[in-house]
Image (cartoon, rainbow, N blue to C red):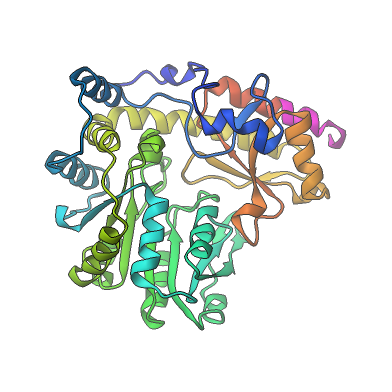
Amino acid sequence: MSIDPSTFDEIIDRRGTHSVKWDAMEALYGVPAEDGISMWVADMDFRPPQAVNDALAQAVQHGIHGYYGDPSDYAAAITGWMKRRHDWDVDPAWLSTTHGLVAGVGLCLQAFTQKGDGIMLFTPVYHAFAKMIGANDRKVVECQMDVVDGRYSIDLEKAKAQVEGVSMVILCSPHNPGGTVWTEAELRAIAAFCVENDLILLCDEIHHDLVFAGQKHHVLANLMPELSDRLITLTAASKTFNLAGGMTGNVVIADDEMRAKFAKVHLAAGASPNRFGMLMTTAAYSQGDDWLDALIGYIDGNRQILEEGLSAIPGVQAMPLDSTYLCWVDFAGTGMDAAEVQRRVQDEAKVAPNHGDSFGKGGETFLRFNVATPRARVVEAVERIQKAFSDLQ
């Protein structure tokens, strides 16, 4: 069933709904929700596929919300989706369901590394990685990426010079915040680097469904099955279908020995699945194809508006996105320091983006804008920001 893209134009008021994106915006960024535009944390201002809300409504109508059991339809929905959308044959036995993927990262650190180990990140990158590394008494090793022809590039010679004491690499694929979709050659090179240096490779593919036309995401586990003795893949329906509140993610491990190590730590954490997250994920992966296809086209239009509109400001350059709904915009050319850029965007334009320095080395002059919101908001945000920098025109 085709989905009318104009569905995503509906402005839904999320204020006062325990939405961190809207209800925490003023406390974090000084931007009041009454007339501000929230473009920071990675959740969308769209309803999920109707099948998701129907599944929840059915559960509410039944009225008993006990422990979740018999995950066979949940596993079938995941394996069916991965085969259908990514040509990836996933054995249900490889799946471990975690309380979201940030928790999954923490469990992987505990299962496969030791306190004091170095964990390599290719920065700038999703800020929760460094947070979890520090919280688990490991050391963040930042290998700053280069920008080559407008996209991120990983310098593995630089990484080799930093590898002493490192036991794991965390790769974001597709990349957040840059939106880069890694090529097959790039992924093979990263894998070879991990093999040569005997490193575990944790590959976060949470944005793998949100790839624009003309780009091809390569599932690393599918591309290099021989890497299975050191590879963990993270996936979830949360970013694809706006289900972050369901706190449900999957750690996919093909190797029996590695999976047993993970299972031991997972058991020790006393974690059990979120019933509602499991129900939502099952419905989304089973019936969400048409909705996702419409969403990708809509977001593609939004990101073009923001990229072109902000890049029209002298000294501002948006990194062209291959994927995700998170636009990464560099203000270095304005000659302003980060505090002045933030003041203009937040205080004058009343737009709340993520601050680039939170993503590690290389992010200091950037802001990250979430364009998964009705188009009218994106247009208004661009107009406000252009006005806030009108003295540069």
Q: Magenta-highlighted stretch: main secondary structure? A: helix
Query: How far across and down, in percent of the image, does residue 9 sit?
Result: 49, 18
Asked if residue 184 can be seen in this view, the reply is no
Asked if residue 88 can be seen in this view, the reply is yes
Query: How far across and down, in percent of the image, does residue 319 sit?
Result: 60, 47
Which quadrant holds residue 222? bottom left
Does 61 sit above or below residue 204? above
Q: Residue at x 38, y 50 (%)?
A: 101
Which quadrant holds residue 363? bottom right
Taking the view exactly as shown, the residue that stands out farthest to the right is 391
Does 204 sit above or below residue 52? below
Q: Is residue 248 magenta?
A: no
157 vs 283, left or right, is: right
Q: Residue at x 39, y 48 (%)?
A: 206
Q: Which residues are magenta?
A: 384-393
121 vs 60, left or right, is: right
Does 353 sit above or below residue 373? below
Query: How far across and down, in percent of the image, does residue 25 sit?
Result: 62, 32
